[in-house]
Each structure stands twice: as structure tokens, then as C-alpha cells.
Image: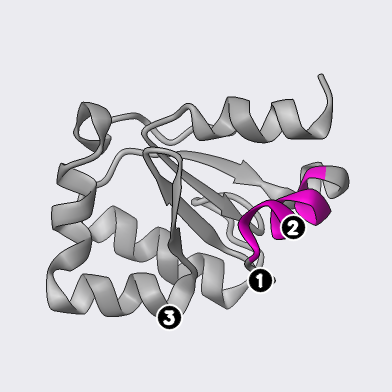
């Protein structure tokens, strides 16, 4: 499967977080913050450890036109990175967006 197909495969999940590390062992402070916020709101999501796929890591930056990680997608659309997700959490908007996700964002975290 080429890198574009791998990205599309991951984005088929209702809620997916491309991050450095895993939710249980984040490897940067920004990824840790987003994983904590998602845990706090009770979101179920898939995740992708970008360190395990350098080709995907580079291509996703071009695909999303977003230069940094983490990147949170809901229903295939980029929601944002750490600062945006934390602000959305504080305003209550994140819970609304996640609730509107296909399947209610109710998918167990996994490292597909």
C-alpha cells in the first residue's frame, strides 16, 4: 500500500490522532497534552505513531498542509494541532465535534 493509501486508510476511522508516540507513552509534550484532553472528554479514537512510519510522517504534512504533530482528524477532516485542540476543549467545542463524529467518536484507541 502506498503512502497516500495508508493515509486514507487511517482517515477512515471516525476520530484519529497522528501523534509522536502512543497515548500511553507519548514522546512529546504536545502529543501528551492532546492525548490527555481526549482521555478527559472520554473520546475513543484510533492513533498513529508517526515515528513508526517516516514516509507517512512526511507525506501527511503535505496532505494536511499542517507542518507539526500531533494532528487530530474527525470524519477525515483535520481539526487541528495541540493549541487548537486545547482551546476547543476549554471552550467546550471539542466535545461537540467529537460527539458529531461518525459513530460518536466511540472507537478504542489503537495503533492501526
Question: How many numbered circles are shown?
Answer: 3
In-image side of 21 versus 108 (left or right):
right
Indicate the position of residue 63 as horizontal and vertical percent values: 68, 51
Secondary structure state at the residue bearing disc 3: helix
Q: Which mark is residue 68?
A: 1
Q: Could you give the CA–CA distance between mark 1 and mark 3, rounded to whole angstroms?
A: 11 Å
Q: Could you give the CA–CA distance between mark 2 and mark 1, rounded to whole angstroms?
A: 11 Å
Camera-side mark, 2 or 1 = 2
- The residue pinned by badge 3 equals 83
In this rendering, is residue 57 above or below 75? below
Q: Which span of residues is magenta-colored? A: 56-65
In-image side of 27 versus 81 (left or right):
right
Indicate the position of residue 105 as horizontal and vertical percent values: 26, 37
Q: Is residue 47 magenta?
A: no
Q: Residue at x 58, y 60 (%)?
A: 26
Q: Is residue 57 magenta?
A: yes
Amino acid at each position: 500500500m502506498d503512502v497516500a493509501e495508508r493515509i486514507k486508510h487511517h482517515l477512515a476511522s471516525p476520530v484519529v490522532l497522528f501523534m509522536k508516540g502512543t497515548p500511553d507513552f507519548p514522546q512529546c509534550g504536545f502529543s501528551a497534552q492532546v492525548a490527555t484532553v481526549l482521555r478527559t472528554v472520554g473520546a475513543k479514537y484510533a492513533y498513529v505513531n508517526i515515528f513508526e512510519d517516516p514516509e507517512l510522517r512526511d507525506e501527511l504534512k503535505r496532505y494536511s498542509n499542517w507542518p507539526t504533530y500531533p494532528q487530530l482528524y474527525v470524519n477525515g477532516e483535520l481539526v487541528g494541532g495541540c493549541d487548537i485542540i486545547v482551546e476547543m476543549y476549554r471552550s467546550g467545542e471539542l466535545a461537540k465535534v467529537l460527539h458529531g463524529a461518525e459513530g460518536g467518536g466511540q472507537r478504542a484507541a489503537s495503533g492501526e
